[in-house]
Image (cartoon, rainbow, N blue to C red):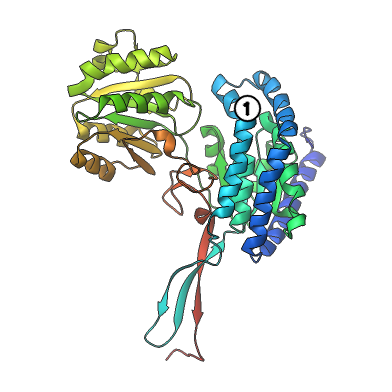
Amino acid sequence: MSILSPTAPAALALDALCLDMARRAKAAAGRLAVVRTAEKNAWLLACADALVANTSEVLEANAKDVAAALGFGLSGASIDRLTLNPARVRAAAEGLRQVAALPDPVGEVREGGVRPNGLQVLKVGVPLGVVFFLYESRPNVTVDAAGLCVKSGNAVILRGGKEATHSNTALHKLLTTELPKHGLPADAVQLVPTTDRAAVGHLLKLNEFIDLTIPRGGESLIRRVAAEATMPVLKHYQGNCHIYVDTTADLDAAARIVVNAKCQRPGVCNAAESLLVHAAVAAEFLPRIGAMLAERGVEIRGCPETRRFLPNATPATEADHAAEFLDLIISVKVVPDLEAAVAHINIYGSKHTEAIVAQDVTATRRFVQAVDSAAVMVNASTRFNDGFELGLGAEIGISTDKFHARGPCGLRELTTYKYVVTGDGHVRS
């Protein structure tokens, strides 16, 4: 369904559509909150099998989106995020299987004890309720979000980008076909059936029914959602991830880490965008890493000191040091010491993922303590800040907020808690 007319009747119809979806999601969330773990896991495993069995149909739908991608003005990195292949479909299915294998956070006793007066006080995990999830380009996220939300007892309203319409529709059909087979409400996973951007605005007003909104995409989308939402928003604006190569670094390891973090998938939020190099190793390391990045088509934008060793580098601007390029571009700066690296990161970073390559434990400990970031990598690529890699099964996004969740958001981050207090006729004196 695509509502394109700006006329009042169309706007009213869209408003009514969004309200109906939200109401149905709220009802489904109430049912999901009391569904047994075994039923949720059975659905997850059945969906994983259905994905693998129907890979050809999913790829056929995805091919239509990829064919139209240039018409939407998508960059090469964005087209890569949009593209599915058999390996990525298998990875999505494996993510569902991992989520099924994880402990259910709903009903989990997180803290508890007995008061001196005999009252038992427990803090128990409960679902958030209804999640409105907006995302761009990456259709595999449809699978991740649905799996995580249902396992954590939440209903989800999915709103993918227009560039992935065919892919998301095919995946949504597979997921929802399995819901009633396993005793789960049919409205637990809904896909907004219109590409009209006004639908987002309508849904963001429905805080009576929607408990949390999670935008996952470009900065403009996230800022719009944060400005218009009437319910809490879990977000990150940018992924300007740094790698700092210390004077004590193993330079072989540093080179591997930088190439992997920048080049493996440059269009994702945990790719490295900035490289900081200690002045003591700059003369040895920069020509080496410069050649390796150039071989892979990476444009280097460097500070004046960097350009002493890499004369072909483009002069870096202030904006370059703060940029999330999402492409084969990296900013490079030579710093005099670790403290200067930390200061640079805390000014220009986006609190997403920062990495240090160093053999000195004192240096790594200081970096971990001083850098303000959702995740810090020590002698490892920034690309590991990912729910799948960190054992969450999958993630619904990476948050740079500090409330209520930070970093990759998996099952536990999609729940809250309530206190359950049990007495034996207790009254307060």
Quadrant in which residue 59 is drawn? top right
Quadrant in which residue 51 is drawn? top right
Residue 256, above or below 410:
above
At 60% across and 22% down in the image, what residue appears?
74
Does residue 389 show up? yes
The percent position of residue 180, horizontal first and vertical second, equals: 77, 56
- Decide if residue 214 is on the left or right side of residue 286: right
| Residue type marked 1 | Thr
Residue 71, above or below 171:
above
The percent position of residue 166, horizontal first and vertical second, equals: 73, 32
The percent position of residue 64, horizontal first and vertical second, equals: 73, 25
At 74% across and 43% down in the image, what residue appears?
174
Q: For this rendering, which residue is in front, 255 or 313?
A: 255
- Decide if residue 316 is on the left or right side of residue 235: left
Residue 174, above or below 311:
below
The percent position of residue 418, horizontal first and vertical second, equals: 51, 69
Please state, as top left, top right, bottom left or bottom right, where the N terminus lies in the image: top right
At 64% across and 31% down in the image, what residue appears?
86
Q: Secondary structure at mark 1?
A: loop
Residue at the far right: name it. Answer: 9
Please state, as top left, top right, bottom left or bottom right, where the C terminus lies in the image: bottom left
Does residue 192 show up? no
Q: Which residue is mark 1?
A: 83
